[in-house]
Each structure stands twice: as structure tokens, then as C-alpha cells.
Image: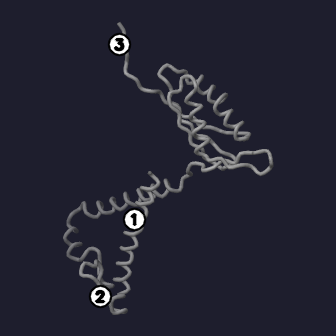
Amino acid sequence: MLRTVNRVLVGLAGVVLVALGAAVLVGALDLQRRWSFTLPSAWPFDGPHDVLLSRGDRRKWRGEGWWWPGVIAALAVVVLLALWWLLAQLRRRRLREVLVDSGDGEGVSVRGRALEDALSAEAESLDGVDRARVALRGRRTAPEARVGLTLSPHASPAEALRHLDAEALTHARESAGIEHLPAKVRLGVLRHRPQRVG
């Protein structure tokens, strides 16, 4: 769902930017005069001398000390948000498939989501673990696990980590034929209401 929304937003942003770029280019290059065509009356830029803010608009706000710093700050925020969004798009995504050694020298591809689900289910069956979320990153021949465990209120974190490594991660390594499966684990505790005694 999030991927679809992301694509729709990127598509809409692309259409808006292409339309604005076309409007600026048509006006700046004076294409309507050169190619003899007319533009709609609502077209924002009619010729190469058109500007975003007219001289009257610029003079109107020149006396206000907050105007230009406010414009610059707003543009800086927009640029920073755009860079943050771009970096978020470029960061590594979940591993789509893991190459499992089948013993014949060729290997078999297993869906990364299937291995994540199996690892999550086994981690949730451990004593003291209420919920588990697993994401596989890295390369398909050398995956890395990111595990989020939500522990029961009275569970021991050390015991939960020991069981996770000895059981769930060991079974995942053996079933996928992987020699090493490094894991980063984040622990959280299930919140509960305080109980009244007496």
C-alpha cells in the first residue's frame, strides 16, 4: 500500500514539475511567437520578460523586514524535505529473495518475505516474546536480519536473546544453508495497566 501511494505521489510531483517547466520554457524561449501559436489566457508566463513577482509586488514587500528571510527559510525547508525524501527512497529496502544452497551447486531462490515470516513466527513462539518483526537486508547470498522483539512485562531480555539466537536464528541459518546470519535486535516491552494488589 505504501509503495503504491509513494508511486502515485512521485508521479503527481513529476507531472506538476514537467508542466511548470514547460510553462517556463515556452515563455522564456518565446515559443508562442516563434512557432505562431496562442496560449490560454491563464498561462502563467507569456514572454521572456515575464517574472514570478512583478516589480510592484517586490516593492510592496520590500519594506517588510520579515519577507525575504521568510521566503528563504521556507525554500530552505522545502529543499531539506526534498533531500530527506530522496535519501529515504535510496536507502536499502527489504531483501526480495535469499539464495539457498540446494546441494547441487546451483541453489534455489526463496522469497525473502517467506523467510521473514517463518523467522517471525518462530521468534513469537519463544518464551517471553509477545510480538516479533523481522526484516531481511543485505545481499541475497549474505542476508542480515533486523529483528524487533516486544517482550512480555515479566520476561528476561537476556533469556529472550539467548533463545532467539539458539533457536530461531539457528534454524533459519540451517534451513537456508547460510553460514552466518548477523542480526540486529531491538527490544521493547509490552505495556500493560498496573494491577491493584489487595
Q: Which residue is mark 1?
A: 13
Is label 1 in a helix, a strand or a loop? helix
Question: Mark 3: few, some, or many residues within 10 Å (few <14, many ≥20)?
Answer: few
Is label 3 in a helix, a strand or a loop? loop
Q: Amino acid at mark 3?
A: Arg
User: What's the mark number on residue 167?
Assistant: none
Tell me how far mark 3 sits from mark 2, CA to CA: 79 Å
Q: Which residue corresponds to the image point at 28% horizontal and 64% vertical from the top-left?
A: 68
Q: Which residue corresponds to the image point at 63% horizontal and 43% vertical from the top-left?
A: 144
Of the two numbered discs 2 and 1 on the same chain, state the one appearing first in sequence: 1
User: What's the mark number on residue 196?
Assistant: 3
Q: Based on the displayed image, in which of its 4 quarters is residue 123 positioned?
A: top right
Q: Is residue 92 above or below residue 22?
A: above
Point out residue 138 in the picture as x, y percentages from the top left corner.
Answer: 63, 48
Q: Is residue 195 above or below residue 124?
A: above
Proximity of marks 1 and 3: CB atoms separated by less than 8 Å? no
User: What's the mark number on residue 38?
Assistant: 2
Q: Amino acid at mark 1?
A: Ala
Type of colouring: one colour
Question: Mark 2: few, some, or many residues within 10 Å (few <14, many ≥20)?
Answer: few
